[in-house]
Each structure stands twice: as structure tokens, then as C-alpha cells.
Image (cartoon, rainbow, N blue to C red):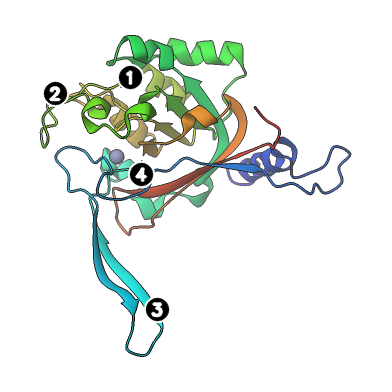
Amino acid sequence: MGLWFLFVVLIALCSGCGLRGKRGEPASEIPRVVDLSYPFDESTIYWPTSKGFQHEKTAFGRTPAGYWYSSFNYSANEHGGTHMDAPIHFAEGKESVDQIPIQRHIGPGVKIDVVEQASRDRDYRLSADDVRDWESDHERIPRGAIVLVQTGWGRYWHDRTKYLGSQKPGDASDLHFPGIAQDAAEFLAKERGVSMVGIDTASLDYGASKDFIVHQILSEGGIPGLENVAALDQLPDTGFLVLALPMKISGGSGAPCRIVALLDQHAN
Ligand SMILES: [Zn+2]
């Protein structure tokens, strides 16, 4: 990692994202930016057994002195809405969210689309073969990549029951949504050395998982996860840069995360 990683990021920024003109002159355009985070409010989806987002007004109006002043308190579980899982979430002794090396938060983006498979089977799990198929259609996934799995579940974000696949509020024992299979997690962690893995569902593991094996494998490998990632339908399969910057909670097992993709202006 280290310098090599930075070099890759700079090359991606300069040549892949339109910061340099065709003949090497400085380009007037900046990359197109896609926001991959959902807003936090009372409708934001949290794990059924977790405390949701609370936003409490403490001031909102003109003060006696005549100036405007607004301020709120907030609280929530770390693992709801668009958020990052730190390795300590599922691996003892691994990094908390504030300890994740900052280089790991930036990387070349890879999007793997399993929308069709998941629309046929809501318990679908991305397999290592799906990842190999993606590579034969595109390129070898680079070391340090941020891999985003698109299941199409983003279309259910505004319908909690469909998104989680359960009718029972407060009960996480019978969830049904797609995720990632053990062999795909092992392949990405051990064979490809990716920096991060994200998904457009509530969990990297599929809803019916009882052992959260994908969380265990990635956490053990020091690889943070991204969950409830938004707007993956707006990304190409490759050729973009991802920045995933969580709130820096000391000792946190995860945190709300602002994720953006930087694309070439002219990319489809
Ligand atoms: Zn999480």
C-alpha cells in the first residue's frame, strides 16, 4: 500500500476522471460526483433490533438578540442508514472506525451487478464465480479496490418491509434480502486484496444469515464494509473513484458514512 496506493489514486483522478485535458493541459471540468449516501431522518432504515436515528431540536429561530440560530441533538445506533462497518464489528482486536488507515477510504471503484439474479431470488448471494465472470468481462479487480455490489434493493429503500423482507418490526430473525456469499468474500479478501466492500442492502451477509460469515471474513482481513449504499444504478461498472468517509467515532464499531463516486464527466 502506501505510496503505491496513492499513485494509483492520483492516476485514476488525473487520467480517469477528466482532471487533465486530452493533450495533458489542465482541464476546465471537474469530475462528475455521485452521492452514494442516503439522508438520515426518522424514516432511515436501521437493523430491526437497533435504535434508529433521533434528531431533537434544541433551537430553531430568532434569538432575542435578533440573529438566527438553529441546533439539534442526535443519536442512533452506529449500524443504520448508509454506514461503515469497522473491522472490530466482527473481529476481536481489529481496528475501530477511527483506526482504519485513511488510505483505505479512497480507492478505484468496481461495481458488480447481480440485479437480475436478486430479482429472481431475494435470498441471492454474490458468488466467487460472479466475481470471476465480472473480471472476464472487464478487468482484474485491482488491489485496493472499493467493490460495490448492486442487488437492485435500493428501489425498496422507501419500503422497509420490502427492503428487509420481513413483516415484523423489532424482529431480525426472519429477514430476506440478497447479500454476498462466503466464497466471494474469501476471493475478494484473500485473492484480490480489496480495500473495502459495499452493498445496497442492510447487510453484507444475506438477510437469512445466522453466522454473518462475510462480516467475519472481511473483519478478520481488516476490510471495512459499507451497507445501505445508495444510487448504485448511477454508476458504471468500472472507471470511477470512491471516497467513503465515516464519522470518526473513537472506538466505534462503525459509523454513518458519506460516500461519493467521482466519474469522468463524459462516462455513461
Ligand atoms: Zn453495519
Residue at mark 1 = 182
Element under disc 2: loop
Residue labelled 4 has its Cβ within 8 Å of some atom of ligand 1? yes
* Category of crowding for the residue at label 3, using alpha-carbon neighbours closer than 10 angstroms: few (below 14), some (14–19), many (at least 20): few
Evaluate if marks 2 and 1 touch, with contact meaning CB atoms under 8 Å apart. no
The CA distance from mark 3 to mark 2 is: 48 Å
Residue at mark 2 = 174
Image-quadrant location for residue 190 = top left
Three-letter code for the amino acid on which mark 1 is drawn: Gln
> In the image shown, does 72 or 98 lie closer to the viewer?
72
**Which numbered disc covers residue 68?**
3
Evaluate if marks 1 and 3 touch, with contact meaning CB atoms under 8 Å apart. no
Which residue shows up at 43% across the image and 25% down it? 149
Residue labelled 3 has its Cβ within 8 Å of some atom of ligand 1? no
Residue labelled 1 has its Cβ within 8 Å of some atom of ligand 1? no
Three-letter code for the amino acid on which mark 4 is drawn: His
Which residue shows up at 59% across the image and 20% down it? 140
Of callouts 1 and 3, the N-terminal one = 3
Q: Position of residue 144 (x, y in %)?
A: 54, 35
Element under disc 1: helix
The CA distance from mark 4 to mark 1 is: 21 Å
Residue labelled 2 has its Cβ within 8 Å of some atom of ligand 1? no
Image-quadrant location for residue 75 = bottom left
The CA distance from mark 4 to mark 3 is: 32 Å
Of callouts 4 and 1, the N-terminal one = 4
Of callouts 2 and 4, the N-terminal one = 4
Residue 169 vs 88, above or below: the answer is above
Residue 192 visible in rendering: no
Three-letter code for the amino acid on which mark 3 is drawn: Trp
